[in-house]
Structure formats: C-alpha cells, structure tokens
Image (spheres, rainbow, N blue to C red):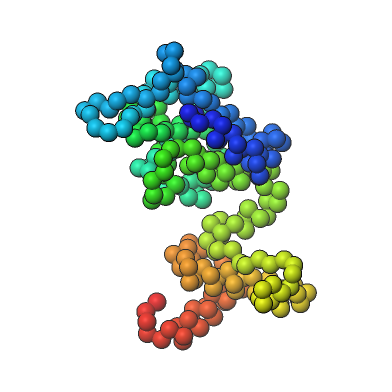
C-alpha cells in the first residue's frame, strides 16, 4: 500500500523478483492508497494534532485499504509497517516471512502516520537499519526482495541461497571472470589451476578471512564444516602472530 505505486511497480518488473512474479511463484499486488480516500481531492494527509511541522498520514485510507484486501484475498498473515522504530530486519526475519502466505506492507510518507495505524492495524513493525528514509517504499522493496529469494523456485539455484552469507554466518568469497589479468591485477592462480579441491579450500579460506576481519560477530553463530574449522584455527593463529598483543 503506497501513494507511489509506480515507484514500487518499476522495481518489481526487474531481476529475480520480476521473474518470480512472471512465473507465478509469488504474487505481488501494488495498491494506490489514494484509491481508498473518499474525498474529491484524494487527500491522504492532514495537519498534526498538537501542532508542529509537517503533515501526518490519515488513518482511514489505510483501514479501508486493508479491509479491501481482506475482502478480496482473505485475512493477511501479517500487516507490516516499515518504520525506523521497528525491529531490525535480518535474514532470520526474512526467513520467517518467507513461510507466510500473505503479507501486507503499509508504506508511510510525510512526517509520520497516525499512530492508530500502528496500534490497530499493523501486526509487525520493521526497520531496515539505523538511518532515516523518507518513506516506506524502499524498505518494502528491500523486504520483498530478501523474502522472495527465500521462497522456493524464486532463485534459479537453490544451492546458491543456501550458500548466502547470512544463512551460514560466513561472508562470500571473491569472484573472478575473464580477463585473467586486468589493470595489472591477476586472478589468483589457484582458480586457473583446475584443482577442484584446492579451489574449494581457497574459497573457504578467503571467505573465512574476510569474515574474521570484517564481521567477526558472525562467526559465533556460524555453521562450519571440519575443513572450515581447521582453516579458521589457522587464520586465528596467524593473526595472533601478526598482531602480537594488540588484543583480539
Ligand atoms: Cl522501515 N522506514 C523509514 N522511513 N526509514 C527507515 C526504515 C523504514 N528503516 C530504516 N530507515
């Protein structure tokens, strides 16, 4: 639900999400909030009670819109309100949502939405990170993309979803394609060697080394196989030697 349906539709037409919609794997309906106003000028906002700058989105169009969806498509599993005040979106939240049948997302604009939309209509408040955006449309698209990837059949290769960084708690390894040398930078020789066991080990090492440096917090919850455990121990020992007593 949005006052900018074209903004949302444009994003839905492309890429993995666009293909999943075309194939009927997911069904996405974009609704124009102004269609649920009752006045001639299709007004969706009003001045704040108590005064102050900016406008507040009126509650009635959101309620009428959700009532329309309920009548057409049945009771939604959740009604999500994107807001910087919500719980922070993550792979885990995306995974939970991907198992739901019917998710409604209410996008707000202006300074805010009448709080009764939150208390009476929303079942879930979600933030996509600690920064402020000017509306819920981009968060809704972020949420949709992350959730759609986890619906079976959306991403061509199911294996690649399983390998995604936040599924396993390990960041991705570097990737290369032709040319083998570019701007004086050569592709790591092991990738051209044809030694599949070496390549697999190199990728694991690169991924773990990156995770250790950039996101050590992820490693606490990571699921590592025996080879990865071994590589990680090596990397940790190596770093301790290099950094001496700088701490961990
Ligand atoms: Cl969900 N909405 C807005 N307006 N800003 C945000 C956000 C949501 N998440 C982070 N910043």
201 to 104, vertically: above or below: below
Q: Quadrant of the C terminus?
A: bottom left
- Residue 210 pos. (x, y %): 53, 70
- Name the one closer to the observer, 130 or 56: 56
The reply, left or right, for residue 23 in relation to residue 73 is: right
Residue 245 horizontal side relative to residue 214, left or right: left
**Image point 68% across, 55% down: which residue?**
159
The answer to whether residue 198 is seen in the rendering is no
Q: Quadrant of residue 28?
A: top right
Does any portion of residue 141 appear in the rendered image?
yes
In this picture, is 194 found above or below 91? below
Q: State the residue in front, 6 or 91.
A: 6
Q: Residue at x 41, y 40 (%)?
A: 134
- Residue at left 42%, top 13%? 39
Q: Position of residue 56 (x, y in %)?
A: 33, 29
In the rendered image, the residue lying farthest to the left is 50
Q: Measured from the top left, where is residue 75 in percent x and y?
A: 51, 24
Count of labels in the image: 0
| Left/right of residue 241 with respect to residue 99 in the rendered view | left
Indicate the quadrant where residue 99 lies.
top right
The residue at the point 68 percent across, 51 percent down is 158
Q: Where is residue 209 shown, x and y percent of the image?
A: 54, 73
- Is 202 drawn above or below residue 164 in the view shown? below
């Amino acid at each position: 639900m949005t006052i900018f349906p074209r903004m949302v539709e444009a994003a839905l037409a492309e890429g993995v999400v666009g293909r999943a919609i075309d194939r009927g794997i997911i069904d996405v309906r974009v609704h124009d909030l102004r269609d649920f106003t009752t006045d001639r000028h299709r007004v969706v906002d009003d001045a704040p009670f108590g005064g102050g700058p900016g406008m507040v989105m009126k509650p009635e169009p959101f309620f009428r819109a959700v009532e329309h969806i309920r009548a057409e498509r049945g009771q939604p599993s959740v009604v999500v309100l994107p807001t910087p005040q919500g719980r922070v979106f993550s792979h885990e939240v995306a995974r939970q949502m991907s198992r739901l049948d019917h998710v409604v997302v209410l996008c707000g604009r202006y300074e805010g939405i009448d709080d009764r939309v939150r208390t009476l209509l929303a079942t879930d408040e979600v933030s996509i990170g600690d920064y402020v955006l000017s509306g819920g449309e981009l968060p809704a698209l972020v949420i949709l993309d992350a959730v759609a990837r986890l619906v079976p059949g959306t991403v061509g290769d199911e294996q690649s979803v399983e390998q995604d960084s936040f599924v396993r708690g390990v960041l991705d390894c570097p990737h290369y394609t032709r040319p083998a040398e570019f701007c004086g930078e050569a592709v790591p020789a092991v990738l051209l060697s044809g030694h599949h066991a070496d390549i697999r080990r190199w990728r694991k090492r690169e991924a773990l080394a990156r995770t250790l440096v950039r996101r050590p917090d992820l490693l606490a919850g990571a699921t590592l196989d025996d080879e990865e455990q071994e590589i990680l121990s090596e990397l940790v020992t190596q770093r301790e030697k290099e950094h001496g007593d700088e701490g961990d």
